[in-house]
Amino acid sequence: MSEVKVAMIVGSLRRESINRRLAHAIATLAPRQMSFRSIEIGDLPLYNQDDDPDPAAEVLRLKQQIAAAHGVIFVTPEYNRGLPGVLKNALDHGSRPYGRGVWAGKPAGIMGASTSHTGTAAAQQQLRAILGSLDMPTLGQPELLFHVQDGTFDRHGHFADSVVGGRVSTWLERYLSWVKLHLS
C-alpha cells in the first residue's frame, strides 16, 4: 500500500480549540506514507432514528468520507469527565442504520488535549468502550494524553517541545503499523 488515508475527527467545534491545534500539529509530523483528511462533524443534525431511511446530505458525506479512509484518528477534548456530544452524535450517525454502519473494521487511534493535568483520560476511556461496540480495532498503547500549557505549540502550530514531538512521532509510527496490520 503506497498511501494510508486517515480520517481525522476533532471532537471540538471551537475555532481556536486546542484539540484542533493538536490535530494540525499531528498532521505535520506524519510519516510520508500517511495522508490526513479532516472530517467535519459540526454540521451534522442530531441523530434521530426516524431519519435513517432518508439521511441528510451531511450524514451521507460523513459516511462516504469514513468509507474512503483506511483508518480514523479521533482527537477529543473532555467535557465533564466524558466525550463531547458532537463526537457521540457523529459516531451514532456513522453506525446507523443497524448493519450498514461505516465504522466496523476501521483501525482507530485516540488522542486528546486539555488544560487539565488529567488530560482527556476519562473521555478516551469512554470513547474506547464505544469504539469496541462499533467493532473498530483501537490502538491501545502508547496513549496520547496532552496537558496543554503555554508553549506547547509554537506560533506556527507545531509542537514547541521536541520531547512532545518525539512522543507523537512514535505514536504515529505505531498507528501506521496498526492500520497496516488490520488492512492485511
Image (cartoon, rainbow, N blue to C red):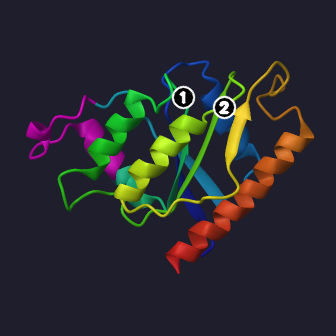
The span from disc 1 to disc 2 (Cα, nearest Å) is 8 Å
> Mark 1 is on which residue type?
Glu
Q: What residue occupies the far bottom of the structure in this picture?
A: 184
Residue 65's disc is: none
Q: Which quadrant is the N terminus positioned in?
A: bottom right
> Mark 2 is on which residue type?
Gly
Which residue bears the numbered disc 2? 119
Q: Measured from the top left, where is residue 118 in percent x and y?
A: 67, 30
Q: What residue is drawn where x is 65% and y is 64%?
A: 176
Label 2 neighbourhood size at 10 Å, few (<14), some (14-19), many (20+)?
many
Q: What residue is drawn where x is 29% and y is 37%?
A: 58
Residue 177 versus residue 20 in the image, above or below? below
Q: Give the range drawn in magenta.
A: 45-63
Q: Measured from the top left, where is residue 157 in percent x and y?
A: 76, 29
> Tag 1, which secondary structure?
loop
Q: Can residue 61 be seen in this view?
A: no
Which residue bears the numbered disc 1? 78
Q: Which residue is more in the foreground, 164 or 54?
A: 164
Residue 145, located in which quarter of the rendered image? top right
- Left or right? Give the position of 107 relative to 17: left
- Whether pointer 1 and pointer 2 mark residues with C-beta atoms closer than 8 Å, the reply is yes
Residue 153, located in which quarter of the rendered image? top right
Report if residue 16 lies within the magenta region: no
> Tag 2, which secondary structure?
loop
